[in-house]
Amino acid sequence: MSQLTQQQLESHLWESANILRGSIDSSDYKNYIFGLLFLKRLSDVFVETAVHIEEEEGSDYGWHDRDEHQFFVPERARWKTIQTTTQDIGDAINKAFEALEEENPSLQGVLANIDFNDKEKLPDRLLLKLTQHFTALDLKNENLSEPDMLGRAYEYLIKMFADDAGKKGGEFYTPSKVVELIVRLIKPEEGMRVCDPTVGSGGMLIQSVDYIKSQGGNPKNLTLHGQERNLNTWAVAKMNLLFHGLSDHRVEKGDTIRNPKLVEDGELILYDRVIANPPFSLSNWGREEAEADSYGRFRFGIPPKDKGDLAFVQHMVATLNHQGKAGVVMPHGILFRGGAEGKIRQALLEEDLIEAVIGLPSNLFYGTSIPASILILNRNKEESKKGKVFFLNGAKDYQEGKNQNTLHDQDIQKVIAAYDRWEEVDKYCRPVLLDEIKDNEYNLNIARYIDSSEEEVMVDLSEAIAEMRRLEIEREQIEVIMNGYLKELGYIE
């Protein structure tokens, strides 16, 4: 039997969204499809392991010995039970999820918030079609042509669901090329602690692992932490990490600003790398809680109540260890707005924590067409970079798309090469002394430091007039010839 290919897997999974189309809101597809995919995968692997033990050792202990499995799947959560149910299918799926969570503490809360027992949205005939569709998909390890296929298919689905959900997609997904760029700027290494305080669906943590693998490092001893306030998105992140074989992680539920959960002994856990794409200019971000913060995160100042951007930046700075580095996506407004934000910016600069400001093209993100920037923060700048900030204007390098622009490999490579060299390139990038920034009243607007205006082309007026005369004579000659033809044809006398 031929193995499943990546393309077959992805198109089959996307087809499951088409089965639901019209019955439920597109922004809800992901919860149902991810839940069923997870259930089917866990069941198939459980059965594969139990059957293998039976064939190899002639014993049936694989069906009830928990130690033989990463996830123990009790009988009512096995796909066979779902597959043979023809009535109250939603109830059977809910019970399967409950049973899985009861047996596996690491799955606590991941599946229970997905409710299949809504007969109006999900009648039995629709669920029957959906479960039959998943039955046709064999997700045993031996049937997958590559080990990370499911992880990649899950990432593909997250992107497709973000496309489908449009503006709402930005709540759980950062375009993967933007993530790749930030990861390559902050360069995580094996053995490090990496955290995403607004983890979304987990893409930044996964790409950190991929980057370490690409550099020949072993990501096994990497500590991955995150926090996410949206329950459904938190569950998506947990499943995403598990599909990528990253079971040894810690992703907490809750609001990072109001209630940071990544703490030990009453102190914030500190990290080597912190990476995030927080919600842009969040209005109800938790100002009251920030004023009474017991972790000392907002020592640079309290951001305005209608713009939480610099609250997230300060949280990230507070969770960096003494050698730590952070990369964060920010709207351009934080680079130049005055008031409380201006004071926070000044304090961050005076402590020499800002290493780079990188401008991105417009329309890269779901839900907003505004151009954003990447801030690189560093508690341990190299000697040659101290007292300087590197500015780069990457706004013009992108691939135009129908709904959104995208970064291409060459665009990313250009930014990385310039950042690694840390030298001036005319109209593109340059390191700027803090003294110059101070003279600009701590304004970090990229246009103040990099002149990217196009040179005006000088026009030779006499040459232009001569060319115009030549074209007029040419036109007159063509008209004479054309009139001759029209006379011959009898159209004019």
Image (cartoon, rainbow, N blue to C red):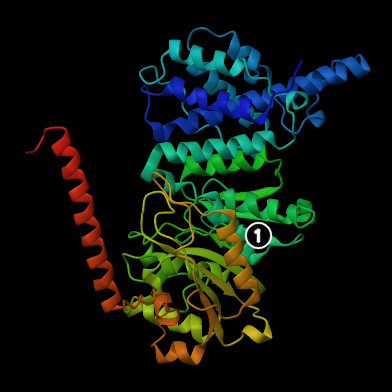
Q: Which residue is most to the right? A: 57
Left or right, 218 with reference to 343: right
| Quadrant of the rendering where the N terminus is positioned | top right
Image quarter of residue 288: bottom left
Quick check: can you spot residue 269? Answer: no
Image quarter of residue 351: bottom right
Callout 1 secondary element: strand
Left or right, 160 with reference to 48: left
User: Quick check: 418 above or below 196?
Assistant: below
Quick check: can you spot residue 347? Answer: yes
Residue located 26% across and 72% down the image: 466
User: Quick check: 3 above or below 150?
Assistant: above
Q: How many marks?
A: 1
Residue in front for this viewpoint, 182 or 253: 182
| Quadrant of the rendering where the C terminus is positioned | top left
Crowd tier of the residue under label 1, counting other residues whose Cα lies within 10 Å: few below 14, some 14–19, many 20 or above: many
Reading the image, the residue beneath label 1 is: 194
User: Quick check: 262 above or below 130?
Assistant: below
The x and y percentages for residue 390 are 54, 78
The x and y percentages for residue 284 are 34, 59
The x and y percentages for residue 454 are 39, 73
Left or right, 278 with reference to 139: left
Residue in front for this viewpoint, 176 or 410: 410
Residue located 16% across and 38% down the image: 486
Residue located 46% across and 27% down the image: 115
